[in-house]
Amino acid sequence: MAGDWIKVTTAESRRRWRDKNQDAVRVGQRAWRAANKDHIALYIRKWKEANPGRIAAYNISHKRSVKNATPLWADMENINEFYARARALGLTVDHEIPLRGRMVCGLHVENNLRMLTHSENASKSNAHA
């Protein structure tokens, strides 16, 4: 019984420290990810192999979001060229205003697209920035 109280107190004190030191936590996480890229890639590959249904569901949902956010007047030729240029440069295409944002939803149009590195796009995490 007393041991449970100590565990709760320790967990709570760790949470408080993380809340107060978010910058230090981020630095530590980045360092760990940089040192363990192979481990992370293997974990992701195994997860994808074990969850093909979830991957398919996400892909279908994403395609539906893009289709619903594409107005009839969108210039698909220019949008497709933009994606081709990004692939040629090894970059990803990001919607500056997310198609499925919490506060605002953007359109799948040429002036809402920008090229980012994969890490920049991942750190944005569907936020309007």
Image: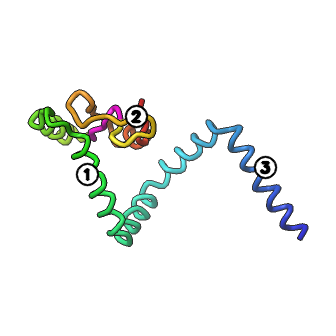
Seen at 57% across and 40% down, the residue is 27
Q: Residue 64 has which mark? A: 1
Residue 74 in picture, x, y percent from top left: 15, 33
Q: Earlier in the sequence, mark 1 or mark 2?
A: 1
Q: To which quarter of the image does residue 51 belong?
A: bottom left
Is 6 colored magenta in this rendering? Answer: no
Type of amino acid at the residue the image marks with label 3? Ser
In the structure shown, which secondary structural element does the residue marked by tag 2 occupy?
loop
In this figure, which residue is indicated by the disc labeled 3? 13
Seen at 13% across and 39% down, the residue is 80
Q: To which quarter of the image does residue 3 belong?
A: bottom right
Type of amino acid at the residue the image marks with label 1? Arg
Residue 85 at least partly seen: no
Q: Main secondary structure of the magenta part?
A: strand
Alpha carbon separation for disc pair 1 and 2: 17 Å
Q: Earlier in the sequence, mark 2 or mark 3?
A: 3
Q: To which quarter of the image does residue 115 belong?
A: top left
Count of numbered circles on the image: 3
Give the position of the C terminus as an image quadrant: top left
Residue 110 in picture, x, y percent from top left: 20, 31
Residue 96 in picture, x, y percent from top left: 33, 32
In this figure, which residue is indicated by the disc labeled 2? 104
Mark 2 touches mark 3? (CB < 8 Å) = no
Seen at 21% across and 39% down, the residue is 70
**Residue count near mark 1 (Cα–Cα under 10 Å), binned few <14, some 14–19, many ≥20:** few
Type of amino acid at the residue the image marks with label 2? Val
Q: Earlier in the sequence, mark 3 or mark 1?
A: 3
Q: Tell me if residue 15 comes above or below residue 57 in the rendering.
A: above
**Residue count near mark 2 (Cα–Cα under 10 Å), binned few <14, some 14–19, many ≥20:** few
Q: Which residues are magenta?
A: 92-97
Q: Nearer the viewer, mark 3 or mark 1?
A: 1
